[in-house]
Amino acid sequence: MTPAVTPYPPGRGAGFLRVLHAEWTKIRTVRGWVTGLLAAAPMMVLAALLAGVGGNQEGAPPVPAGPHGGPVTDSFYFVHRPMAGDGSITVAVSALTSSIPKGPGDLGPGTVPWAKAGLVIKAGTRQGSPYAAIMVTGGHGVRMQDGFVNDTAGPPGPVSAESPRWLRLDRSGETVTGYASTDGTHWTEVGTARVSGLGSTAQAGLFVASPPAVRGGGTAGSVSTATFEDLHTREGRTGGHWTGTQVGARSPSFAGYPENTSGSFTASGSRITVTGAGDLAPAVRDSLPTGGHLRDLLAGTFAALIAVTVVGARFITEEYRDTTIHLTLAASPRRSRVLVAKAAVLWAVAFAAGLVGTLLAIPLGERLARGNGVYLFPVSSATELRVAVGTAALLATASVLALALGAILRHGAVAVAAVLVATVLPCLLTALPFTPAGLSKAVATVTPGAAFAVQQTLVPYHQVASNYTPYYGYYPLAPWAGFAVLSGYALASLAVAAVLLGRRDV
Amino acid sequence: MSAAEIVVTGLHKRYRATRALDGMSFTVRPGLVTGFVGPNGAGKSTTMRVILGLAAADAGTALVAGKPYRSLRHPLRHVGALLDAVAPHPGRTARNHLLWLAHAQGLSARRVDRVIEQVGLTPAARRKAGGYSLGMRQRLGIAAALLGDPPILMLDEPFNGMDPGGIVWMRGFLRSLAAEGRALLVSSHLMSEVQDTADRLVVAGRGRALADAGVAELIAAASGNRVAVRTTARPDATRVLGRAGGAVSATGPDTVTVSGLPADRVAALLTHGAVPFSELTAHRATLEEVYLELTRDAAEFRAATPTEAPR
């Protein structure tokens, strides 16, 4: 007679919590994995340090900021005179032509869609001061703009000597109203702007601006010339007491005039010809090349991404290598639970490490950069938090994608190669300046690399032609939409891995 | 059905062109060590993996304590398994290797330290498993199997890589586990490793159980009606006994084995024929012979061997 052996009495915790506990113990007891995951934090910080101390802009002219707080381009040719209190100013534009460089020192006629010629009432010639303007453009018809970021469309179509466009600005206190007309008699209201800070005596007059033309992956400075006629104010036709000023001649957001050109104005009879370059618009990455943005401080994301994805893949492929997977599945026969527990533990650790990294890297990098006089595109604390949390979530989710691929492929080197192709390669492609914009945008839309959109802090403006590509920090998808693409890949791969794990013999 | 029982019924499994299991059936009973022997490729490891739910059988059932393994809530508390070639992560200490396994079953670190002590690994418990010898890894594997204090233990080639001292320890350890009332299934491709330990034997060959019986039963069956004779006149003995209808074969320079004739008839024939002989014993088969006899046709790879079994 043999004594009966009964199973060991049950212990604490429910089923899934136990699997989770086991996977947590597993991940924390292999030093290589812990090091790889936690390394994400110092990698982020180190890269931020390097980025922070890298640039030195001390002594550079200040970046003008608009009433909205953001950086602006406020460089244009202004033909003006004081306007005391309320008033009205009217002009007809009969020509607007632009030139862009065709080769070194060789200008030729070209199209600059956002070349501007019209009327502006501005607090003064100081950069960033408030204004309201109405203008004809090279390719977008009549526009009413104010405060650098506000833009209202008026009647479309280009101007010519045969079909000139009359423009009018009326100031009444803080309210400026813009009108357009095809005959100088019948007026259409284009828009009204409330402009605070115009002062009791504003400067009013003609302006011509000509932003750089987008060519290929870069830009080329342009210059535009407009012909005005019939300039008059409420007091009547005005004579020769107008002043020509190049506003913001020396500014980080102004590329200057093409070689052998400059701003000027000439008057003959009732006709005034004005030549100008620059823009009255919010600054974007392209127009403020010396400006840094948050993503620059997070260059460590690449290195951290490689580290966490390699660990993610190895977290399961090393179980296949050692055949520990037999023991894992013998202990937890509900296999999909094991995979989910692994993913949860991995995600949490990678997220924590990534978050520590970004929360340290961002303020540190900002401090160092600002200490060196580097201008950083301003961001709200909410955006900063979104970038920090989003980047940590990106790292964590990419490591889970790696885990899933590891579970599918079951071989360390193969899985790591697949992961690098799936996540790091897209990021590299978008980080290269020579990648064609179309390819770059496609990559940032359909590959797991779309998640880098969580790092976007720059705002694109429809009224500023620029290279809004991932390379410059503009992503085709909204931050969390980009993150959702990566999450979709991770979840789909995890589902495939779970099915295969359940079906395969081990 | 007892909690301490494995019942395998008609397992079939194919891996592409190979028939790994072809109707494997046997029972493992409590309080006994069941040896699971057979040549490499006989299906022993596959059977164990099917029992543990790691591999799926094409047909047949494997029940542990009356249930399929994968439906057990805390499987390691019912069955402890040592699987061949399962290595702990080389970067993890032995203790941590057992710790995650314990956590998976809701067991405490105290239980981990207890099994480490049981298998004699305490001094090395906090060393990385990557530096372990094969023998130490086997002890660690046994510790993992014992973790849930299970009534059933399934050990695949537990003697592999063990030094002679380790083998002796393992035998004693297995016996003591069976004495506690546990059911043990111990596989080996070498009969000599299990012959002194097993109470019962499942002899596997070509994916099925060729025998599933008690050790004594098997030996009795294999011994047959055979008599060993020591004689200085081998040719005379062969002639005399052969003429009387016995099948005689030489087993050494001065020994022959006779079958088909009872011992007293052999003695009478030899005396009558004046054939000198110094010893006459009823032959008792060894387990090794039983094994070779049973697996003769089943062995996948066999070197050309003499027709008669050794010894």
Image (cartoon, coloured by chain):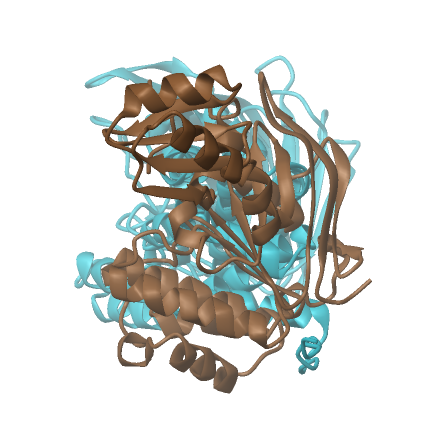
* Residue A179 occupies quadrant: top right
Looking at the picture, does residue A47 appear above or below residue B119?
Answer: above
Q: Is residue B300 above or below residue A400?
A: above
Q: Is residue A69 visible?
A: no
Camera-nearest residue between A113 and A435: A435
Colour of chain A in the rendered structure image: cyan
- Chain identifier, brown in the render: B
Q: Quadrant of the N terminus of chain B?
A: bottom right
Name the residue rendered at 70%, 76% in the picture: A1
Give the x, y percent position of residue A406.
48, 42
> With respect to residue A252, does A180 lie above or below?
above
Dividing the picture into quarters, in which one does residue A499 lie? top right
Seen as rendered, the residue at the extreme bottom is B110
For the point 43% across and 33% down, the residue is A418
Q: Is residue B170 left or right of residue B55?
A: left
Quadrant in which the C terminus of chain B is drawn:
top left
Instruction: Kindly tell me whether residue B186 is visible in this rendering.
Output: yes
Count the marks. Answer: 0
Give x and y (percent) for residue A242. 41, 46
| Residue at left offset 29%, top offset 56% | B134
- Judge from the rendering whether residue B278 lies leftward or rightward of residue B290; answer left or right: left
Name the one closer to the observer, A240 or B237. B237
Q: Position of residue A83 (x, y in %)?
A: 53, 58
Residue B236 vs residue A465: left or right? left
The residue nearer to you, when weighing A449 against B185, is B185
| A479 to the left or right of B70 | left
Find residue A11 and report its horizontal and vertical position in percent. 67, 82
- Residue B206 in which image quadrant: top right
Q: Nearer the viewer, residue A285 or A199?
A: A285
